[in-house]
Image (cartoon, helix red, strand yellow):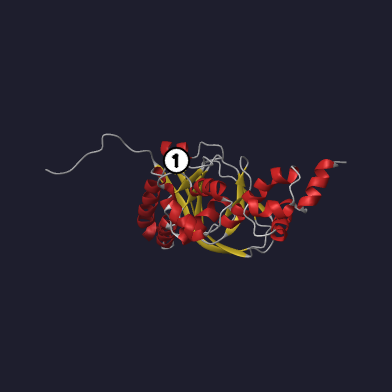
C-alpha cells in the first residue's frame, strides 16, 4: 500500500507567540531585549526603528526585513528618532534547530533577512490572524509556522556582512546586491551614471535595486556614488590640484557642486580639510 514512515524524528520546535501589530511611540527610549530560552523572528512591515546586537552597529530597519535572534541573544531597538509609529510582526518559538543555529553563528550573532517579495511577512501575518482565534486557530497558526521554519531552513548563502541573507533576485549570481553595486560604482564613478543603467548592468529592476540597496546599506545608490567620488578626490586634493580640475576628474559637473557634497560628508570645505591636515594643531 502507498505511504511512508519516519526513520528519523525531526527536532521539536514549538510556536510560543505570534503577533502582528502597529505601535505608536509615546516616550523615546532604547528598548533592551533578550529572551533566554526563545528564538525571536522580528519583522518590519513598515519602516521600524534602528536595531543592533552587541556585535553590530545600529542597522536601519526599512520595511521588508526580518531579524532572527537565537535564544539568549541581546539586542536593542532605538526608539529615540523621528519615527512616531511603526508596523511590525514577530513570533517567539522554542526548541533547537541546527540549521537555524548555523544561520545565526556569525559576526553579528543573528540573521538579517531581506524579504523583497514579502514571503516572511505573509506567513507571519497569516499565522497571527489564525492565532487571534484562540485555541481554534492554533493548528492553522502552527501550519504557517512550519512553512516559516522551512523558509528559514533554506536561506540562500549569506552575503556581506556574513549575517545578511537575501530572499530576492539580488541573491542570484554574484553575492549581495550592495557589494555588486559598489563594485560597479567604483569602476565607473567618473562616468555619467543612472539608476536605469545600473539596474540593467546588474540584471535587476530599478525599483528592486532602489529598495533592496537601501535595505542593505541604509542609504541610496546615489549617496554611495557621491561618497565614492569624494573619496576618490582626496589624493588629488592632497597633491595640490585645483578644485576646478578635480571636480570633472571624479565625476562632478563643477567645483561648486563638488565642494557642497564634500562638506556634506566631511563637515568642512575641501580647502579647510587640507589646511587642517597641514596644521593639525
Callout 1: 10 Å neighbours few (<14), some, many (20+)?
Answer: many
Residue at the extreme right of the image, as rendered: 281
| One can see residue 38 in this view | no
Is residue 80 left or right of 40 when viewed as pictured?
A: right
Residue in the picture at 36% in, 51% down: 147
Is residue 54 left or right of 101 when viewed as pictured?
A: right
Is residue 159 left or right of 11 when viewed as pictured?
A: right
Residue in the picture at 35% in, 53% down: 143
Q: Nearer the viewer, residue 105 or 235?
A: 235
* Numbered-mark total: 1
Residue in the picture at 46% in, 43% down: 175
Q: Nearer the viewer, residue 11 or 57?
A: 57
Placement of the N terminus among the 4 image quadrants: top left
Instruction: Point out residue 162 in the picture as x, y percentages from the top left corner.
Output: 51, 40
Residue at the extreme top of the image, as rendered: 7
Placement of the C terminus among the 4 image quadrants: top right
Instruction: Point out residue 12 in the picture as x, y percentages from the top left corner.
Output: 39, 40
Instruction: Point out residue 16 in the picture as x, y percentages from the top left corner.
Output: 46, 50
**Location of residue 259 by image quarter:** bottom right
Instruction: Point out residue 271 in the picture as x, y percentages from the top left corner.
Output: 79, 51
**Location of residue 108 by image quarter:** top right
| One can see residue 201 in this view | yes
Q: Look at the numbered disc 1 and give the secondary structure of its residue.
A: helix
Residue underneath mark 1: 100
Residue at the extreme left of the image, as rendered: 1
Q: Nearer the viewer, residue 274 or 45?
A: 274
Q: Nearer the viewer, residue 205 or 136?
A: 205
Amino acid at each position: 500500500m502507498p505511504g511512508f514512515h519516519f526513520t528519523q524524528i525531526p527536532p521539536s520546535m514549538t510556536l510560543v507567540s505570534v503577533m502582528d501589530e502597529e505601535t505608536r511611540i509615546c516616550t523615546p527610549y532604547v528598548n533592551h531585549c533578550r529572551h533566554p530560552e526563545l528564538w525571536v523572528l522580528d519583522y518590519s512591515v513598515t519602516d521600524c526603528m534602528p536595531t543592533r546586537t552587541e556585535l553590530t552597529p545600529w542597522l536601519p530597519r526599512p520595511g521588508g526585513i526580518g531579524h532572527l535572534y537565537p535564544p539568549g541573544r541581546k539586542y536593542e531597538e532605538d526608539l529615540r528618532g523621528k519615527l512616531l509609529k511603526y508596523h511590525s510582526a514577530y513570533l517567539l518559538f522554542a526548541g533547537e534547530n541546527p540549521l537555524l543555529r548555523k544561520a545565526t553563528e556569525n559576526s553579528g550573532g543573528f540573521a538579517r533577512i531581506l524579504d523583497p517579495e514579502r514571503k516572511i511577512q505573509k506567513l507571519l501575518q497569516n499565522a497571527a490572524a489564525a492565532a487571534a482565534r484562540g485555541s481554534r486557530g492554533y493548528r492553522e497558526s502552527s501550519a504557517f509556522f512550519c512553512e516559516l521554519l522551512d523558509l528559514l531552513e533554506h536561506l540562500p548563502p549569506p552575503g556581506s556582512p556574513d549575517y545578511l541573507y537575501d530572499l530576492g533576485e539580488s541573491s542570484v549570481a554574484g553575492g549581495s546586491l550592495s557589494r555588486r553595486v559598489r563594485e560597479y560604482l567604483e569602476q565607473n564613478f567618473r562616468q555619467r551614471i543612472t539608476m536605469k543603467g545600473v539596474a540593467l548592468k546588474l540584471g535587476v529592476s530599478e525599483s528592486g535595486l532602489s529598495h533592496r540597496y537601501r535595505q542593505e546599506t541604509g542609504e541610496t545608490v546615489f549617496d554611495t556614488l557621491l561618497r565614492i567620488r569624494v573619496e576618490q578626490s582626496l589624493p588629488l586634493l592632497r597633491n595640490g590640484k585645483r578644485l576646478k580640475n578635480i571636480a570633472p576628474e571624479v565625476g562632478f559637473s563643477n567645483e561648486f557642486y563638488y565642494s557642497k557634497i564634500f562638506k556634506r560628508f566631511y563637515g568642512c570645505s575641501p580647502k579647510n580639510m587640507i589646511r587642517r591636515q597641514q596644521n593639525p594643531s
